[in-house]
Image: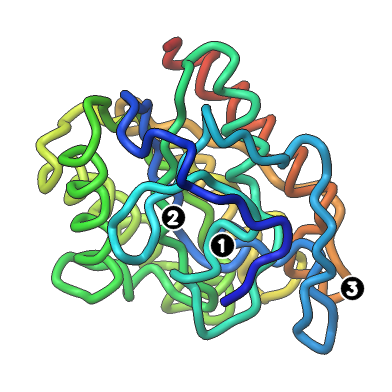
Amino acid sequence: MELPNSISTQKNDPHPTKQIFILSGQSNMAGRGGVDKSKIWDGVVPPECSPDPSKIYRLNVRLQWEPALEPLHHDIDDKKTCGVGPGMSFANAAKERMGVVGLVPCAVGGTAIKEWGRGTPLYENMVKRAAAAVQDSAGEIKALLWYQGESDALTQHDAESYKENMETLIHNVRADLNLPSLPVIQVAIGSVEGKYVEKIREIQKGIYLPNVVCVDAMGLKLKEDNLHLTTEAQAQLGRMLADAYFAHFGL
């Protein structure tokens, strides 16, 4: 796939020490900013999401590091059109204090929390990618950034089981990556679509496990579908995630 503003990797060291962040969840983490009704991305990249080939890398679908640029999830959430998500603005905010940032895109649009249970393809791929990121870098995994829940706001059963499923996911990821204190920053969904949105949001804001914090997306501007964040809102969310990381976990 030919990407706008593509960057050559030839002049960049693909193996600098990286501070690694897993990006996971569903479409708002994968990024739909700038994607119109005809499923075409407009290619607009705000300054907060600009690439920095010496400081921001992504792990591609082949488990190789490369300079990161929008759309970060183009080869991961590859059955949908990806646009701007929160990852690049997060990395640009984080790099000033952390140096080189490595992003591990894992999000897939339209996925419910039950599809991220241990043993599922989504979960196992996320763990495999996270493990590969560490193996191919002298850095360490600093946090899991999680934005998901819209698909679970549609039925009472899914909403009522969300808390248990989300807490299980956190325990499983920490165990399988051998990182018992891995910070997790989850986003409370800002969608207004779905009968049980408020139930999901209540659960997300009420998970009180150690090293788990919540950033609230409610009030950020939505596209016309009332589901996905605009490009500008995604850039804002990335900065909010960085602020939350440094406020709660330091470097």
Secondary-structure class at tag 3? loop
Label 2 near label 3: C-beta < 8 Å?
no
Where residue 44 appears, as percent x and y from the top left, is 84, 57
Q: Residue at x 69, y 30 (%)?
A: 239
**Earlier sequence position, callout 1 versus callout 2:** 1
The residue tagged 2 is 105
Secondary-structure class at tag 1? helix
Q: Nearer the viewer, residue 10 or 64?
A: 10
Residues at marks 3 and 1, CA–CA distance in whole angstroms? 18 Å
Label 2 near label 1: C-beta < 8 Å?
yes
Given the image, on which type of amino acid does mark 2 rest? Pro
Q: Residue at x 21, y 75 (%)?
A: 120
The residue tagged 1 is 30
Q: Which quarter of the figure is the C terminus placed in?
A: top left
Q: Residue at x 59, y 82 (%)?
A: 80
Q: Farthest residue in the bottom direction?
A: 38
Residue 128 lies left or right of residue 35; in this view the side is: left
